[in-house]
Image: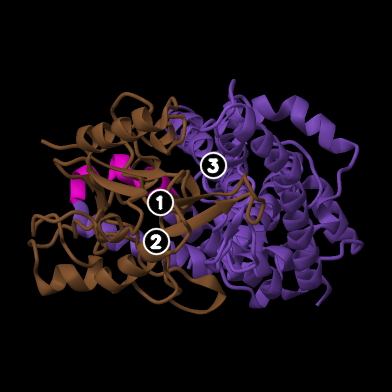
Chain colours: A purple, B brown
Amino acid sequence: MTIVSRMFAALACLLLAAAAWAQGSAPQDSAKAQQERAVTQPGNNQPVWSEVRSGQPNYTSLPGREMGVLVQPQARFLGQDKFTTAGEAWRQYRNGPIIFYGGWLVVLVALVIAALYFGRGPIKLHDKPTGRLIERFSGAERWAHWTMGISFVVLGITGLIILFGKYVLLPVIGYTLFAWLTALAKNLHNFVAPLFMVSLLVFIVMFVKDNLPKAHDFAWFARAWGMFMRGEHIPSGRFNAGEKAWFWGGVVVLCLIVSASGLVMLFPNFEQLRSTMQQMNVIHGIAGLLVIAASLGHIYMGTIGVEGSYQSMRTGYVDEIWAKEHHQYWYDEVKSGTAASGDTAKAGAAPQASH
Amino acid sequence: MARMKFLCDAERCIECNGCVTACKNENEVPWGVNRRRVVTINDGVVGAEKSISVACMHCSDAPCMAVCPVDCFYKTEDGVVLHDKDLCIGCGYCFYACPFGAPQFPQAGAFGLRGKMDKCTFCAGGPEADRTEAEFRKYGRNRLAEGKLPACAEMCSTKALLGGDGDVVADIYRERVARRGTRGAEAWGWGTAYGQPPKGKS
């Protein structure tokens, strides 16, 4: 309950901020100026047009949000050099830097990973597997991970279709099929999102303890190049510094930003203004593209990039030699019986990775 | 070809909402949607009150068109911006982008789920064959195909709202302005909707 109420509190804060932002100069001044102008220069309605251009709501008898706004207020997004009508500023930002840099970011990361795979090849075990297995992830941890992971992939792909499909897929598959696909993508995006957010919070709670930074994590970063290029193994705890960076930067920071900004757009029935939704869309796009690019690295390392890593999250068990080579400190803890997770006693009943 | 434009004369609009009603009736607009609305500035202040009727202005460089993820908008030979409801996915991006708040969404479910976007068509229907039942059901009357102008402007009791070929509308307005002895600063919306020269989608 606290999580839900916090989300709504955050949403309420955003709405209040947007509402405060939308308030501005007193309309009485404008009315007085217009009265005077009508006397001194009959027919000159400049004060009225200034009022219209300010984007302030005025009177209308029709119900609805922002119905009294004739033209959206002026706005400018980070990096834009001049103010323009908010909708136009959003359009230029979305169709400009977000699509251009975001698109190339995802493509370049994919190319770097492909180069690493075909150039360097996956990171393999140095020694032969012992056949003795250690439990690395409990059933609940794997459920949390895969619920989050699969919903993330669905959200990522559908999000990319909504942002880039017009330029990439539409020319290939045509209007009718593409509109059908994008409608499906939009509905999947909207209905999978709540599942993702819940599993995200569960996942963070479950994994935060073993992802707290340790002194030896800094040494890992210093030697990371050797790991990627020469397949060196660096001792680390249950999670190495790379995994921790992904946990904090990708899962905690970016995914929470994407979730919060997404919620504001997902439920447009809380009287939020267009300006709020434009800002959230920009934040959602930037954070979403960053986390998609970063997730490609995680997916690569968790599947074909590192021998034995996929089995650890698929089955929950790793070979002793895998634990020793990749997570020496964690292996030592498991062996000495001080680790919170890890159970060698179950090894006999554990599913074999080779099955 | 004509370049269709709307113009609202703030010196004449009396906020009767006849244009809104005419539009709703003529096009049988979905429940909860108003394709046109009248906004009053300095409401109730003697000597300063001005009313303006606004709907889709059929922009030269339309932001809705540029942001639509499924590219469902198109422009007719007359410069009217129309959209295809069979393609629309109800994402709301056109509503974010439009300066005038023209795109409206009928509610399609709980939590503000959007249906297919609905907006002013300049009484020009949609992509279906002209004056068919299917076209009327989705987009309303295709008055342009019948050789008529938009119902809102035709219905306007004070002729504040003008709709039609931009050159003709401009001539009428220029004539009015000359008789009033002012410079024409009261023309509304043209700077925003038609200000920039036409350019490709960006």
| Span highlighted in magenta in the image | A160-174
The picture places residue A18, in percent across and down from the top left corner, at 71, 50
The disc placed on residue A289 is 3
Mark closer to the observer (1, 3): 1
> Do badges 1 and 2 share one subunit?
yes
Residue position for label 1: A162
Three-letter amino acid code of the residue under disc 2: Ala
CA–CA distance between discs 1 and 2? 7 Å
Residue A130 visible within the image: no
Residue position for label 2: A185
The answer to which image quadrant residue A82 occupies is: top right
Quarter containing the N terminus of chain B = top left
Q: Residue at x 8, y 59 (%)?
A: B146
Ranked by sequence position, the earlier of labels 2 and 3 is 2
Callout 3 crowding tier (Cα within 10 Å): few <14, some 14–19, many ≥20: many
Three-letter amino acid code of the residue under disc 1: Ile
What secondary structure is marked by label 3? helix
The disc placed on residue A130 is none
Q: Taking A30 as reference, is A300 left or right?
A: left
Ranked by sequence position, the earlier of labels 1 and 3 is 1
A260 above or below A355?
A: above
Secondary structure mostly seen in magenta is helix
Cβ atoms under marks 1 and 3 closer than 8 Å: no
